[in-house]
Image: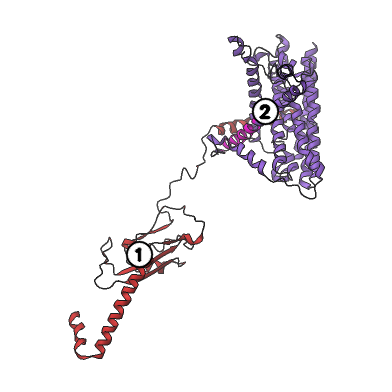
Chain colours: A red, B purple
Amino acid sequence: MKEYLKNTWLGVWTVLVGMKITFKHLFQPAVTIQYPDVKLPLPERVRNRLYVNIDDCIGCDQCSRACPVSCISIETVKAIPGEDLGQTSNGKKKALWVTKFDIDFAKCCYCQLCVFPCPTECIKMTETYEFSEFRRQDLNYHFSALNTSEAIEKKNNWEKFQAEKEAQKAAAAAKPAAPQQNPKTEGN
Amino acid sequence: MFEWLSDLTGNQILAAFISAALPVAFIVPFVIFAVWLERKVSAHMQDRLGPMRVGWHGWLQTIADFFKLIQKEDIVSSEVDKKFFNMAPYLVFIGSYAVYAALPFSNSYIGSNIDLGLFYIIAVSGLVVAGILMAGWASNNKYSLYGAMRSAAQIVSYEIPTALVILAMVMFTGTLSLAKLSDLQTSSFWNWYIFGGPDWGWSKLLVLPFMLVAFLLFYISSLAEVNRTPFDLPEAESELVAGYHTEYSGMKFAMFFLSEYGNMFAVSAIASVLFFGGYQSPIGYIGNSLGISWLVPFEQVFWFASKGIFFVFVQMWLRWTLPRVRVDQLMTLCWKYLIPYAFVNLIIIGIISLI
């Protein structure tokens, strides 16, 4: 009988204790963060979407070679003499037209290995992590400053220059004596 | 109310229809509010926020969900017993709606002011069991059947302590009419039966602790009767998918939902009529002190609704405090604890009301 009454009392009392706890929690501020409106601050060295400052890129292809999943594809065209491409922000002279600089973020594994080899520090991680797309090909980002027609033009320029050089060479080979000395003196 | 309406419309049938449909105008907004409240209360008790997007703090969320439920396809699988399957949700709702016929919303609006109000409510709420059993059996699904069986066992068991407590109250007050019960507890809150009733004297002091016990017993067993946590075994989602309404979708599911929340308010309202003065204001009426007599019924509706909603809130509070009991624990609680206590309480209150 004593046990029975004790059980009853314990039952009622423990329910009241539990209700007290839940009532306290009712007025505690919620821990929920309403995500799209409020965002958590990101850690300092967070790795997200890459950004390429194409003005600083010298087209050295080191990032592409460092990439373990081959998501960066770079094509370059040499500048012909007379074209001034300017300098990068840390004083390196640019000698290549970067006709294609694509990063496929569908492939990218965000390992940051491409960032370290860059001699001009033009490829870097940003804090953007919301860039989902409806079509997979939209995740292929084009960073090149040149559009397609410009890239073709640069390529043609280079091929024309190359062809002219070849023609010059051929002409020089045809007349071996005199013109062959010319480049040498120029070189000196 | 019926007389007033028949005077207004000049047609008794029309007046009867309007008078009978009025609780729907209360139940539907109440259910929409209560579902929202349930979500917010559960969320804040777990340090979450709950719905926040649809309207201010998500208050339109339930309305959006209601429209979603209306648009949903009404799936009736090929193996169900179609006649009973389609009938069950409406039967359950009729069971819980019929209770509202006897609830005294105010001095001037009681669906049916019958002398056997409490008896009628106990009798008619038994219809819910039939509906739930019908739903579980007709679904042709083992989980539904398990849920229905549990529900039947649970509701039938917990009718006993409920009835015993109501019997004790009937002995003490000498009436079965809910309107009369409310009238007895008039003027101020110390006349409520939880504080020993309107008669001053040593009997009030003597009966006070037993009234408290009676209220606790009634509240616990009514919680079990409406299948709320910790007694929500019939629809235990971790064990039985959704219990007796597993196979239902769309509006039929909404009918079950409506009747569950309607029942929650009904038992809360009965608890408030029995122990907390029903529609009576605890502090007096503004309408009386200002001399505006038509304001009084509205105030009474307000007090009735707010008392009911407070007890519904306590039900939610308990739901998010306690885990679900096992089937054997459920039966132990009923047969070994609630019924003996209810009996002893009945005898003691009987003796006190005799002397």
Q: Position of residue B289 (x, y in %)?
A: 59, 9
Residue at image position (67%, 28%) is B25
Magenta extent: B29-46
Q: Residue at x 79, y 36 (%)?
A: B131
Looking at the picture, tell me which residue is in the foreground, B10 or B262: B10
Magenta stretch prevailing secondary structure: helix
Which of the 4 image quadrants contains residue B316? top right
The crowd level at tag 2 (other Cα within 10 Å; few <14, some 14-19, many 20+) is few
* Residue B340 visible at all: no
Q: Which mark is residue B25?
A: 2
Question: Where does the image place residue B10, in percent across and percent down from the top left?
Answer: 74, 18
CA gap between label 1 and label 2 equals 68 Å
For the residues labelled 1 and 2, say whether their Cβ atoms are less than 8 Å apart.
no
* Amino acid type assigned to the residue bearing label 2 in the image: Ala
Report the front residue among B26 and B148. Answer: B26
Rendered residue at 79%/42% (across/down): B85
The quarter of the picture where the C terminus of chain B appears is: top right
Q: Please state if B210 lies on the left or on the right of B44 as rendered.
A: right
**Quick one: SS at disc 2?**
helix
**Quadrant in which the N terminus of chain B appears:** top right
B123 relative to A120 in the view: left or right: right
Residue B49 in the magenta stretch? The answer is no
Kindly indicate the quadrant of the structure image that contains residue B191. top right
Secondary structure of the residue carrying numbered label 1: loop
Residue A24 shows in this picture? yes
Residue B259 position in % (x across, y down): 72, 34
* Residue that badge 1 annotates: A146
Which residue ends up furthest to the front in the rendered image? B10
Mark 1 residue type: Leu
- Please provide percent x and percent y for residue B338: 76, 28
